[in-house]
Image (tube, rainbow, N blue to C red):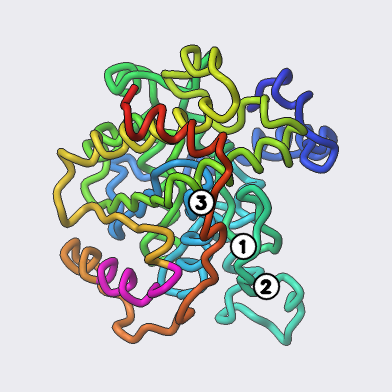
Amino acid sequence: MYKNNEENKRTEKFKRNSSLENLLGEINNELWCAEEKLLNNNGSAEYPLIFVVGSHRSGSTLFMQWLASLGTISYPTNLMSRFYKAPIIASKIQLILTDERYNYRNELREFNSTIDFSSENGKTKGVLAPNEFWYFWRRFLAFKDLDYMSTDELFEKVDIDTFKSELAGITDVFQKPFALKAMILNYNIDFLDKVFKKAIFIYTKRDPFANIESALKAREKQLGSVDEWYSFKIPEYEKLKKLNSYEQVSGQIYYINKAVERGLKNVAEYKKMTVNYEEFCVNPKKFHAELREKLKIQGCEIDNEYKGETNFIVTRKSVSDENVVNAYNKFYKMGD
């Protein structure tokens, strides 16, 4: 599921638990036999899928936590992520353990948890907190050196029927739209747009200076050095690796945003929206109204009354690091 050389670079706090990985591998292989019987051959989802795209450190985790807190949108939880080969079964298990409709005399009340809007490099805490769900995605994406394949290759190599059926099965269990991070396919939005008729693409953006600085901090925290590559290896990886760390990160974010914007150009207006992190923090209610309208166009109505947070604290309001500014200028002002 992951490359050993990258795992070895992680700081102790972020290293994976090998015993857990092995046990999960066994359980998921065993569950797949039952999961396969639940797949819907036509793979048509009654409820829309919500794909969150954009650069790492752009506010996507906060946005997912916010969606989770609303109660009207389903999403991959930390519990579900452990059953990455059996997400439909995982959805049913989650309902039994955590849904109030199935609560019997508070036997399993400790499984319930609230969304506290905290995270560390995209990692959340709590049974029902949003999970990035990358193990699920990587089941279908046979990437090699780079985390990328062309759209033509995806249509040739991805088990699209199973991919669609599993996501449709999840929405069928929860009877709600299902939102998940899809940054692993930032460069293939056209693929997702063609595969899923009912979908909304949420493009999370952030002030580029703040985005660059945040991504540098994430490198240092998770890998122990700003010089180590963090997040997906995009098509421009080999070119960027020759630059200094500040320029690497600036270019990484620049190219990702460019790819997302290019991919969204051909997506219908009712299937896409842009969420600027700073604007979202000031007025999340505004984005709820926009999302509600786009879901309605696709035949899905959620609660009109907004019951979410009134605002969030904007982090990294001012960035003055000369290295960040120079790196920004290399790509954003002068182009690549």
Q: Amino acid at mark 3?
A: Ile
Q: Earlier in the sequence, mark 2 or mark 3?
A: 3
Residue tagged 2: 113
Is the C terminus in the top left, top right, bottom left or bottom right quadrant?
A: top left
Residue tagged 3: 88
The crowd level at tag 1 (other Cα within 10 Å; few <14, some 14-19, many 20+) is many
What segment is highlighted magenta in the picture?
Answer: 281-292
Find residue 319 and report its horizontal and vertical position in percent: 54, 51
Whole-angstrom CA distance, mark 2 to mark 3, is 21 Å
Q: Nearer the viewer, mark 2 or mark 3?
A: 2
SS of the residue under disc 2: loop
Is disc 3 in contact with disc 1, using a CB cutoff of under 8 Å?
no
| Residue drawn at point x = 63 percent, y = 45 percent | 83
Chief SS of the magenta region: helix
Find residue 170 and report its horizontal and vertical position in percent: 45, 54
Magenta includes 192? no
| Residue drawn at point x = 80 percent, y = 40 percent | 20
Q: Earlier in the sequence, mark 2 or mark 1?
A: 2
Left or right: residue 258 compared with residue 7: left
Does 139 sit above or below residue 201? Answer: above
What label does residue 21 carry, if any?
Answer: none
What label does residue 129 carry, if any?
Answer: 1
Q: Amino acid at mark 2?
A: Ser
